Image (cartoon, grey):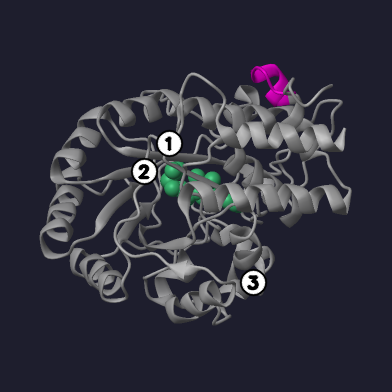
Amino acid sequence: MGAEQPLCRNEADLRKTILDLLREEDPGRLEELWSVADRTRKAFVGDAVHLRGLVEISNRCGRQCAYCGLRAGNLTLERFRMSEEEILDCAREADRQGMGTVVLQGGEDYGLPAEWIASIIRRIKSETPLAVTLSLGERPQEELETWREAGADRYFLRFETSDESLYRAIHPLLPDRPVHRVEMLQRLQALGYQTGSGIMIGIPGQGYESIAEDILLCRRLDLDMIGVGPWVPHPQTPLGSGRLKMTVGPGGQVPNSELMTYKVIALMRLCCPEANIPATTALATLDPDRGYELALGRGANVIMPNMASMEYRKRYEIYPKQDFLSRTGSTVQNIKTRIRSIGRTVGTGPGARVAGSLKRDVFPPAADELNTHAQCWS
Ligand code: SAH
């Protein structure tokens, strides 16, 4: 195929290129993938690494997700809910440390009144210059509207996997309030939220084709933030204990490995070049010493330092992370040092996605660059 005839003329071609790269094992070709992802990151979002202060406000949850340690059925977990003052203290600390965003995340805790969350959002917005991101699960439209009016800027909700039957098996619907997460993401966009989503990598039963579809779905949704991390087995969950067994198609099981996570980060950067993409904590738990640096060099541009006390952080156990928590590398000061040590800068201000450098009617330059590389390799 000649250079004037790009490989990825349409989504089917792009899907094939993504699939090939997900299965790529040749070290030289992987180096090329990291390098093109890194150059794309630099061209579209620059060298700044934005820090988002993460506050896990409640580990109570009414759901029964088969992967998550916060699931209602995990009776071994000691539950907590932070107070308004504790949350405000974390937000003020994030501001003092120079961060531009605070992320309020939690289980689906129906004991958190929408109005209480709204008043916290209003206080953060009036007392600090921070952007506010919410990650509180599936919530009724009225609550999403109330929080947006209160000043919330962003909402983060992973669709986890685009494989519908796998998703239904690991994420039981609430019978009285079925929510389709992709549809909820579109409602969030319509409300004016900067919207983020993403997936877990290596869920039992997850095949390569579905990961390629996940990447294309993120692209179609034109997301502002994309968070991906490996599935980490939690022994107190049906998936982590092996009680729930999933079968995978003939294409084989995607590993929940560090390498696969880097491939997905790099491909997300190429397919969604403007998005803010974090080096996630789940990834850092697999490689506490190098995980952040490697992700930042392969497409990522965000880190989310945790602002809460160690007591709460230990109990927000969506997956086991004791080893990670016992290290000091994830303190804000250390994270800043780590960012600078790889020649990057620490972002200032809210660090929102800047849209508009893409022409929507053609595949973006990044995809073209990917095509060029794919052609070199084929
Ligand atoms: N209740 C909110 C926030 C959940 S925690 C929600 O459902 O959106 C945020 C993310 O942690 C989830 O979306 C999921 O992708 C991830 N997560 C949960 N359990 C995990 C596990 N065992 N391994 C890796 N990631 C996990």
Q: What residue occupies the far left of the structure in this picture?
A: 126
User: What amino acid type should be assigned to the residue bearing mark 2?
Assistant: Val
Question: What residue did someone put label 1 on?
Answer: 357
Residue 327, position in %: x, y?
58, 80
Q: Nearer the viewer, mark 1 or mark 3?
A: 1
User: What amino acid type should be assigned to the residue bearing mark 3?
Assistant: Pro
User: What amino acid type should be assigned to the residue bearing mark 1?
Assistant: Ser
Circles 1 and 3: CB distance less than 8 Å?
no
Horizontal side of residue 346 vs 84, given as left or right:
right
- In the structure shown, which secondary structural element does the residue marked by tag 1 occupy? loop
Tally of numbered discs: 3
Question: What residue did someone put label 3 on?
Answer: 288
In which quadrant is the N terminus drawn?
A: top right
> Over which residues does the magenta segment extend?
7-15
Horizontal side of residue 195 vs 248, given as left or right:
left
Q: Distance between the residues labelled 1 and 2?
A: 8 Å
Question: Crowdedness of circle 3 by 10 Å Cα count: few (<14), some, many (20+)?
Answer: some
